[in-house]
Amino acid sequence: MGTGRAWPVMGFLLALGSAACFALSGIFASALMSAGWSAGAAVTARIGFAAVVLAVPTCIMLRGEWDRVRRAWRPILLFGLLAVVGCQLAFFLAVQFIPPSLALLIEFLGPVMLVFWYWIRTRVQPSGLTLIGAAIAVLGLVAVSGVATGGALHPLGILFALIAAVGNASYFAAGASSDHGIPPLPFVGLGLAVGAVALVVVSATGLLPFTATAAPATLVSVSVSPVVVVTGMVLISTVISYVLGVAAARRLGATVASFTGYSEPLFGILWTIVLLAIVPTGLQWVGAALVVLGVVTVKLGELRPRVRPRTPALSDS
């Protein structure tokens, strides 16, 4: 009789666990790049090994359903190139210039970008609450970046983080579509495979600098093998986070799960403080709160009816 109450509680716990695992990716990436790894090598290792780990469950779940994959090649390709390669590579490039927690906060402006993209594409105006939320999130970005105090962060870091936000928006857009009929886990597995192939090809041509070293990496003030860092990044921040996220979405539904997913920037700040001993300034704390508040307000506004463009009334005469 109590299962109805326990079911959503477990879903929330899984969603929070997913967000906490995702938020560690910047910590792992910073450790690798401080040890001499290029951003291209770090993201290729993350996506490539994660695709290998998910290959078996993907093949099992798609057994006898490969016609669906053939029909859905376009969304799979877009997911792999934009949501996986574009988002992850831009984020890893961003953390070379700005702290991981701040890069994560800027990346999570993706849903705000998505609102305006849908507005332009459908010509259906968002609700007033949605627009207020977007303004709050942008104000938070200004506070986080340090522009207000004249101590702006590295512009390249901000630029790459904004590119990651575009990839983040494409992730939500692709994940919301279920017309192809492919379950979430194999869809993610196929997207990671596409992303891994693209990264390997680009790296092999020399367009993407690829440098990986065996030098020890510093993680939580401890010198460890880069194998340990890559393993943590692949299993914790990619495979486990995706699996927990899929399990949470099945229990909570996409809308509620997306709300809890916005706890990821907060976990990013928490991990940065605990593991890297980097404490944001007071203004950046305010900016972080505004970004999260703005994104949540945007999502709340999406639940309200949208204003459709007026069409001229047809005369009976």
Image (cartoon, helix red, strand yellow):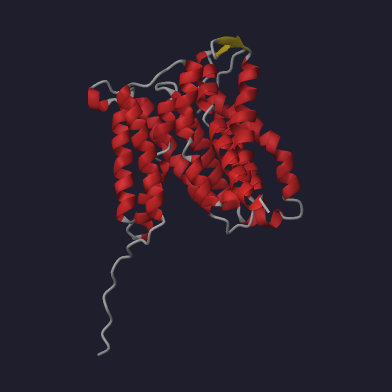
> Between residues 71 and 157, which one lies in front from this camera angle?
157
Image side of residue 63 versus residue 36, left or right: right
Q: Is residue 209 visible?
A: no
Q: Quadrant of the C terminus?
A: bottom left
Vertical comparison of 310 with 65: above or below: below
Task: Please say if 276 is above or below 304.
Answer: above
Residue drawn at 59 percent across, 39 percent down: 13
Where residue 106 appears, as percent x and y from the top left, is 39, 34
Residue 228 image point, x, y percent? 64, 18
Query: Which of the 4 quarters of the picture holds residue 101?
Result: top left
Name the residue furthest front: 1
* Picture residue at 40% right of the left edge, 44% below the top: 296
Please tell me whether residue 228 is drawn above or below residue 315 in the rendered image.
Answer: above
Location of residue 143 by image quarter: top left
Nearer to the camera, 27 or 121 = 27
Quarter in which the N terminus is drawn: bottom right
| Residue occupying the point 26% across, 75% down | 312
Q: Which quadrant of the structure image shows residue 102?
A: top left
